[in-house]
Amino acid sequence: MWDIEVKETVWHRLANEIFFRILRGEYTIGKKLPSYIYIAKEAGSSPETVRKALRELQRHGVIEKTRLGYFVTSDKIAVTAFRERYLASIEEAYHNAIAKVEI
């Protein structure tokens, strides 16, 4: 049996990119995000894909949805916690890849 995995969907990669922009300070803690339509045009993606990405970040407490739109959370602890979970998942994937190629 072949061991081929495709885990990341487009909306998942887009959620990661939005999160990276938060970490770099392009999207500021506590501030409003650009509209999902603007993000979709900028990313060359569909608005529905952006909405899925935003919902994923909202589920993890990184962004908040209000009547006025989406905002980066003011909770720096939530952002740091999500960053640590993300890094742990990358590290796990790295170790799994090493295990596949060890002789």
Image: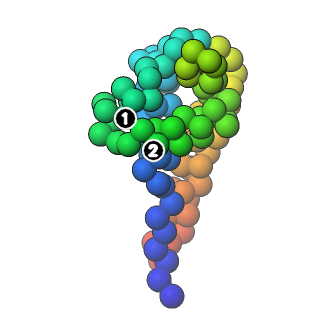
Seen at 62% across and 18% down, the residue is: 67
Residue 76 vertical position relative to residue 10 in the rendered view, above or below: above
Residue situated in front as seen by the camera: 57 or 23: 57
From the top left corner, tell me how far across and down residue 5 is, in percent.
48, 69
Seen at 67% across and 37% down, the residue is: 59
User: Answer yes or no: do the residues labelled 1 and 2 have beta carbons within 8 Å?
Assistant: yes
Seen at 37% across and 35% down, the residue is: 40
Answer yes or no: is residue 98 visible: no
Residue 23 vertical position relative to residue 52 in the rendered view, above or below: above
Per the image, the residue denoted by label 1 is: 40
- Secondary structure under the numbered disc 2 in the rendered image: helix
- Give how far apart the Cα atoms at labels 1 and 2 are: 8 Å
Mark 1, Cα crowd under 10 Å, few <14 / some 14-19 / many 20+, is some
Residue 2 vertical position relative to residue 100 in the rendered view, above or below: below
Amino acid carrying label 2: it is Thr
Per the image, the residue denoted by label 2 is: 49
Ranked by sequence position, the earlier of labels 1 and 2 is 1
